[in-house]
Image (cartoon, grey):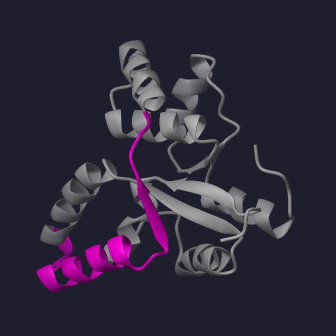
Amino acid sequence: MSSTAVKVLLDSTYILPTFGIEVVGLTDEDLLLLREAGKRGKVEYYCLSVTWIEIIGKVCKESKKRQIDLETVDIAVESLLHSGFYKWIQPPPQAVKIAFNLRILGHRDNIDNLLYATSITNNMVLLTMDQKLRNFLEKHNYKTGNILAHKQLLRKIRNNQQIN
């Protein structure tokens, strides 16, 4: 990847379509544009290893409604872990401390806390549609300029704008 590529940490929302799960507000065209941005070296996609906790829960819940079989899960997991398109990372110690503080302040979603904290400590964009997280962070005077939804990210990439 290019050194000018934007480092983007993905919320589970952007991983679920790999399992065939549709996400409200995220179209096939959006997914294709995000993929193309990655293939062209405009962005590097990162996933936090602890996100599997959230993904497994959501996929299992949806599998009851949508009949997601184990073969689909196997293909999705293989793609996510071994395609080279996504880089899987651990939260650094400073991020764990920030996430801990967010929990103490009252934000109960530990995965989101770790995602946000990792994005801040690693100077990454956090790609999420979670307005509740953004509102909480703003209420507590945390930086939110690195939090983008896919439409915002795609617009910035298209316009070659600086992110952050």
Image quarter for residue 161? bottom right
Tell me the residue at 61%/54% (across/down).
149
Q: Is residue 2 above or below residue 35?
A: above
- Looking at the image, residue 137 sits to the left or right of residue 12; the answer is right
- Looking at the image, residue 80 sits to the left or right of residue 130; the answer is left
Tell me the residue at 86%/64% (across/down).
160
The location of residue 121, given as percent across then percent down, is: 57, 34
Is residue 68 on the magenta stretch? yes
The C terminus - image quarter: top right
The location of residue 98, given as percent across then percent down, is: 46, 23
Q: Is residue 1 above or below residue 57?
A: below
Residue 126 in view, yes or no: yes
Tell me the residue at 21%/58% (across/down).
56
Which range of residues does the magenta coloring cover?
65-92
Is residue 28 on the magenta stretch? no
The N terminus - image quarter: bottom right
- Looking at the image, residue 9 sits to the left or right of residue 33; the answer is left
Q: Nearer the viewer, residue 11 or 96?
A: 96
The location of residue 18, given as percent across then percent down, is: 37, 75
The location of residue 22, given as percent across then percent down, is: 39, 71
Q: Nearer the viewer, residue 49 or 137?
A: 49
How many numbered circles are shown?
Answer: 0
Residue 132 in view, yes or no: no
Image quarter for residue 19? bottom left
Q: Is residue 82 above or below residue 25?
A: below
Q: Nearer the viewer, residue 57 or 97?
A: 97
